[in-house]
């Protein structure tokens, strides 16, 4: 899953980069990674950073 997240971040960056040689191709790869993440994680969209450790609460 981490590799897919890294691929999503990198391809999204390149798709938005005006100097990229293949913006459309990177956008397609970013969309594919996004769909993979949402399907595996069972979420609707890929958003920002997850909550930090300060919001973590143990169950015990």
Image (cartoon, rainbow, N blue to C red):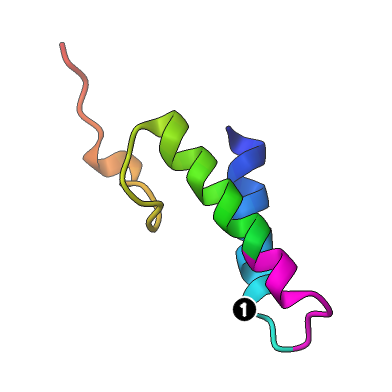
- Name the one closer to the observer, 27 or 10: 27
Q: Residue furthest top?
A: 60
To which quarter of the image does residue 13 belong?
bottom right
**Dividing the image into 4 quarters, which one contains the N terminus?**
top right
- Name the one closer to the observer, 56 or 43: 43
Q: Residue furthest right?
A: 21
Q: Residue furthest bottom?
A: 18
- Name the one closer to the observer, 55 or 7: 7
Asked if 29 appears above or below 35 in the picture, the reply is: below
Q: Could you say where residue 58 lies in the image, as x and y percent from the top left?
A: 21, 20
Q: Residue at x 25, y 33 (%)?
A: 56
Q: Could you say where residue 7 lies in the image, as x and y percent from the top left?
A: 67, 50
User: Image check: 23 left or right of 57?
Assistant: right
Task: Find the magenta span and give its range.
Answer: 19-27
User: Image check: 60 left or right of 2?
Assistant: left
Q: Residue at x 64, y 48 (%)?
A: 6
Q: Could you say where residue 43 lies in the image, as x and y percent from the top left?
A: 32, 40
**Which residue bears the numbered disc 1?**
16
Q: Residue at x 67, y 62 (%)?
A: 11
Q: Residues within 10 Å of mark 1 (few under 14, many from 20)?
A: few
Residue 49 is one of the magenta-drawn residues: no
Residue 26 is one of the magenta-drawn residues: yes
Asked if 13 appears above or below 29 in the picture, the reply is: below
**Dividing the image into 4 quarters, which one contains the C terminus?**
top left
Asked if 8 appears above or below 56 in the picture, the reply is: below
Asked if 39 appears above or below 49 in the picture, the reply is: above
To which quarter of the image does residue 54 belong?
top left
At numbered mark 1, what does the secondary structure look like: helix, strand or loop? helix
Q: Could you say where residue 20 lies in the image, as x and y percent from the top left?
A: 78, 80
């Amino acid at each position: 899953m981490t590799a897919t997240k890294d691929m999503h971040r990198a391809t999204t960056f390149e798709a938005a980069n005006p100097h990229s040689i293949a913006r459309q191709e990177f956008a397609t790869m970013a969309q594919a990674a996004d769909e993979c993440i949402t399907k595996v994680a069972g979420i609707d969209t890929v958003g920002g950073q997850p909550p930090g450790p300060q919001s973590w609460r143990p169950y015990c």
